[in-house]
Image: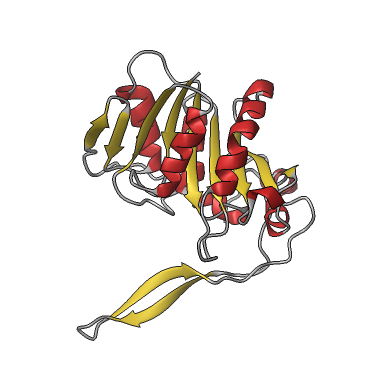
Amino acid sequence: MRILLTNDDGIHAEGLAALERIAAELSDDVWICAPEYEQSGASRALTLSDPIRVRRLGPRRFATTGTPTDCVLMGLNELIEGKRPDLVLSGVNRGANLAEDVTMSGTVAGAIEAMALGVPGIALSQMGFYDLGAGYEVAEAYAPGIIKKLVAVGWEKNVIINVNFPGGDPDKVTEVEVTRQGFRDAHIRHAEKRTDLRGREYFWMGFRQERSKPDAGTDLRALYEGRISVTPLHIDLTHMASVHALKGVLGGAPPKV
């Protein structure tokens, strides 16, 4: 199996090194194309107004000045020699990618771009970095087995798999739950106003460490309760109930004022 790895934390991220170790348990044909610098929150951004520079770091290892989406596109279409990969793994992200965060995540976007280009994609993220000394132990312990099972059973071509690992001791993680995407009932994103050394104001975007009260069966609930969350996602954002409701109002000839 040929595998392409990417991430949004950058080519030097510890999570990418963890993903390399995970991939090494699955294949000896592993390629890497990751951003030169951190691209967290880049979502599916493409670099359209600037050139993308590519730096070759090894026989199968590349860094680009682009986004995770750029990296997957470049890796699949330009940089990998020979046949296309059978799988793209994106991560392991430093921090979870859950609920509404998946629409902003560069990690998830890497898997989505793979799917859009016809290659199965899996996004992997590790919760728990706000605890001192937390690392990627849970992801490294369980990702290879989960990926093997996912690849064996397969999934639909318009779907990606979003896997989130809880923090803590791997031996205390006893369950994998297939979940649906949740949505927080708390607003955790905020801008903090600061002042630089010249007395000028600036803002730093961040997240409050406040937990919501998610429903059972959601990715949030699973992670909060120490389970590994596996969520199939797709990018069809159509709300069908509203489609049916609006057809009765706007169907037919366009209205005139």
Residue that appears at 73% across and 66% down? 213
**Left or right: where 180 falls relative to 130:** right
| On-image quarter of the C terminus | bottom right
Foreground residue among 73 and 144: 144
Q: Is residue 59 above or below residue 144?
A: above
Check the image and name the residue furthest to the right. 216
Foreground residue among 141 and 211: 141
Check the image and name the residue furthest to the bottom. 199
Residue that appears at 43% across and 33% down? 5
Q: Position of residue 186 (x, y in %)?
A: 64, 69
**Left or right: where 187 falls relative to 12:** right
Residue 236 appears in the figure: no
Foreground residue among 235 and 38: 38
Residue 149 appears in the figure: yes
Residue that appears at 69% across and 59% down? 224
Color theme of the render = secondary structure
Question: How many labels were placed on the picture?
Answer: 0
Foreground residue among 57 and 78: 57
Q: Position of residue 256 (x, y in %)?
A: 58, 51
Q: Quadrant of residue 238?
A: top right
Q: Quadrant of residue 57?
A: top left
Q: Position of residue 22 (x, y in %)?
A: 51, 35
Q: Position of residue 133 (x, y in %)?
A: 50, 61
Q: Is residue 5 above or below residue 216?
A: above
Residue that appears at 70% across and 55% down? 226
